[in-house]
Amino acid sequence: MKNIYVLGGGIGGVEAAIALTKQFKKDKNYKIHLISNRPFLYIYPISIWIPVGKRTFDDVIMNIQQIADIHGFNFIQEEVKEIKASENKIITDKGEHSYDYSIVALGGTKLRPKGIEHTLSICGSPEEALKIQERFFELIEKGEGTIACGFGGNPKDPTAVRGGPVFEVLFNFDTYLRDKGIRDKFNLIFFSPSQEAGKRLGEAGLKKLQKLFQDKNIQPVLGKKIKQFEEDGIVFEDDSKVNADLILFTPGLNGHPVLKNSDLPLTEAGFVKINKFCQVEGYDNCYAIGDCAYFEGPNWRAKQGHIAEVMGRISAKNIKLQEEGKEPTETYEGHLSILCVMDLGRQGVFVYRNDKKAIAPMGVWAHWAKLAWEKYYKLNKLGKAPTLDFEL
Ligand SMILES: Cc1cc2nc3c(=O)[nH]c(=O)nc-3n(C[C@H](O)[C@H](O)[C@H](O)COP(=O)(O)OP(=O)(O)OC[C@H]3O[C@@H](n4cnc5c(N)ncnc54)[C@H](O)[C@@H]3O)c2cc1C
């Protein structure tokens, strides 16, 4: 019996476990295990609706045990503490697991700039989205306020930045306040140390963003390095200060702490070094996918959910090839693209970028597309809809 372990039950890990069960479904000699610390899969892309109360916590999660039962893999709820790739071992809070192959999909963490405790992030723990909702509704109750939303990068890795969800939450606040007829009582601010925050979306996407800020009366504070966050605002390096009642900030991404405690090769920013087949450098039976991996590509590439899924499927196919005595052939290279629907509340901007084109059309249909994706994603994980590869 050969044991294949997937570590991390997020978007990448769950897809990898499903893909592995498909690759090895008829063979009783293989057992697929998924280890994750949470009993649920948290669907980050739709969590952006929690702050305005359009989704509950339960709407945004899926029970991993249920997914495991449907697809036929073994779910183990444990906390990974260390990966000993040179010994093919995983150490968890409950014991030790030996593997023939592993796929690391533990996601990332965030940098911690000074005063970060005075901010909240939609890209943080699932519980944090609920805290944002609580603070937002407190301000609604009060009847006025200033909300500042921003994001930063990681100077050690240009791909370790997450801006899209920050824009989505900000525009959803705007729509909510307009619907209530109280937008004029609130000041909405977008801040970023970068002068061209959002440029990863491409020329068309960036222009659309700048126009949206103007049309929706959102005050941009761009190109100012952040010194620290305080309880009542953001202090910049030039010692100017923007006061705010609620600060949402998503810092640049950083490698997972478990990886620092393991023997996998890491970049300076703490992400796992992999080759184009998703194999960890130096270990051909260990793969790393999604946010925890460092992957090469065009300078606009980004850590996204659909890339994590593609990498999960690629890894499963390559493991199957290895077991057939062949060399891995599947690579992530041809799949790199930016693909997201930036939701604005009642409309959306459909952002797509690859080597050949960068488009960002906007409309009500894009909002509906995100709603459709939500349904599709859940049905797909429950085995009730086929996997669609969204390549344009
Ligand atoms: C708010 C938000 C909105 C987004 N919107 C989009 C979008 O519209 N489109 C898009 O393509 N991408 C989007 N993304 C990015 C996308 O969600 C990520 O790229 C994707 O989740 C990465 O998947 P992953 O499996 O690598 O990591 P994650 O989804 O973060 O999963 C990591 C998993 O590992 C588990 N874990 C962590 N530590 C341990 C441990 N020590 N032991 C055991 N288990 C552990 C966690 O519980 C989690 O289940 C968004 C991200 C956020 C935060």
Image (cartoon, helix red, strand yellow):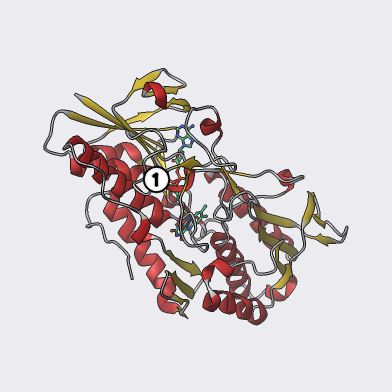
Give me the residue at 73% from left, 65% from top: 143
Asked which quadrant contains residue 8, the reply is: top left
- Mark 1 Cβ and ligand 1 under 8 Å apart: no
Identify the element where label 1 is drawn.
Answer: loop
Image quadrant holding the C terminus, namely: bottom left
Establish if 216 lies above or below 300. Answer: below
Q: Is residue 313 above or below residue 356?
A: above
Rendered location of residue 135, percent (x, y): 67, 53
Query: Which sits in the foreground, 190 or 32?
Result: 32
**Quadrant housing residue 180:** bottom right
Task: Give the camera-side residue of 43 and 278.
Answer: 278
| 147 lies above or below 325 | below
Q: Position of residue 314 (x, y in %)?
A: 30, 49
List the residue tagged with mark 1: 275
Of residues 10 and 347, the one nearer the viewer is 10
| Nearer-the-camera pick, 146 or 1 | 1
Q: Amino acid at mark 1?
A: Asn
Question: Residue 284, position in %: x, y?
Answer: 33, 35
